[in-house]
Image: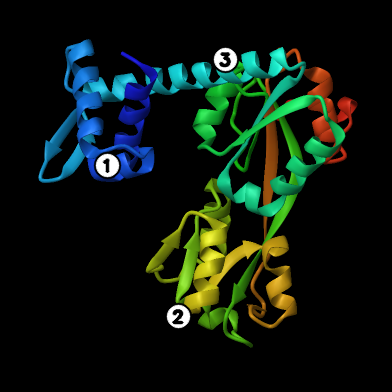
Amino acid sequence: MDIDELKTFLEVHRTRHFGQAAENLCVSQSTVSARIRQLEQSLGVSLFSRERNNIQLTSAGKKLMVYAESILTSWTRARFEIGTEDEGQIPFIIGGVPSMWDINLQDFLHYLHETLPDIALYAETQTPDVFIRRIYEQTMDMAFIFDAPQTTDLDIIEVTHVPLVMVSSQRGLKIEDAFTNEYVLVDWGTSFSTSHAKYFRDAPSPTIRISLGRLAKDFILSQGGTAYLPEPMVSEHIGNDSLYYVKDAPVIDRLAYAVVNPLNQKKELIQHALNFFNIENNKIQRIY
């Protein structure tokens, strides 16, 4: 078994397609097939079921998923830390769910780069459950998510709130007409879904659902429509009359959290990072 085999296994699972996985990995499809076959032979099990181009993990494949992600994470971190420490730099690994990078984490990254010249930054995006596991394992130093995990073992720090506003490509749209104007439902997490359902109990089921705010914004700018988007993301478009506020639509606030492991030895770096959000050390406390 080697690292390339595990990377290929994860990419096939993610894409559900050998050809797409090959394209993403910049190798031939026969190489992808050979790597998966070698991995299955090494483990003595089948990892994927293939029926009518429907590629799914077997029960053994599902078990391997957790180990494969952990092994690759540890390998990546080892390479990163060994390389940077040889150069006298301190590795600092941060993660954020995709939409948070689009809202304010890009400025946060600039802040770290400008104020901490001796660190080697590694920034990535993943799902919240992966982030939480990696914070537990200390293979990541900080993670930024929307829905706070209910745990007493990690520090869950409220860092900012993000106002989500309903905007439309149509000027003067009223709230009662919003859901008939190509409404795009953006996945802003559990608490947003709860608030959205409370405000709009009788709204018809949307025909368009998008998981990323940036993609939803680009869609309605190009094709027209209406969506809840972060105010910082749309302020420029409101100003140049390419998007408009929907009259009387409620603002839905999203709370954003930083997750850190209290056992992490890089406490000074973490505190410096939190200063970007004007959070002092004595204000850090567990929410759960």
Q: Earlier in the sequence, mark 3 or mark 2?
A: 3
Q: Amino acid at mark 3?
A: Ala
10 Å crowding of disc 1: few (<14), some (14-19), many (20+):
some
Tell me the quadrant of the picture where the N terminus can be found. top left
Q: Can you say whether 222 is above or below 231 in the image?
A: below
Taking the spot 57% from the left edge, 60% from the top edge, the residue there is 214
| Residue 78: image tag | 3
Numbered disc 3: secondary structure: helix
Q: Can you say whether 167 is above or below 216 in the image?
A: below
| Position in image of residue 54 (x %, y %) | 17, 43
Residue 139 in view here: yes
Taking the spot 57% from the left edge, 53% from the top edge, the residue there is 192
Question: Which residue is disc 1 drawn over?
Answer: 16
Q: Nearer the viewer, residue 62 or 32?
A: 32
Q: Earlier in the sequence, mark 1 or mark 2?
A: 1
Foreground tag (1 vs 2): 1
Q: Earlier in the sequence, mark 3 or mark 1?
A: 1
Foreground tag (3 vs 1): 3
- Left or right of 58? Residue 119 is right
Numbered disc 1: secondary structure: loop
Q: Can you say whether 228 is above or below 91 in the image?
A: below
Foreground tag (3 vs 2): 3
Question: Which residue is disc 2 drawn over?
Answer: 180
Distance (Cα) linking label 1 and label 2:
34 Å
| Position in image of residue 95 (x %, y %) | 62, 34
Quadrant in the rendering for residue 120: top right
Q: Can you say whether 81 is above or below 19 in the image?
A: above
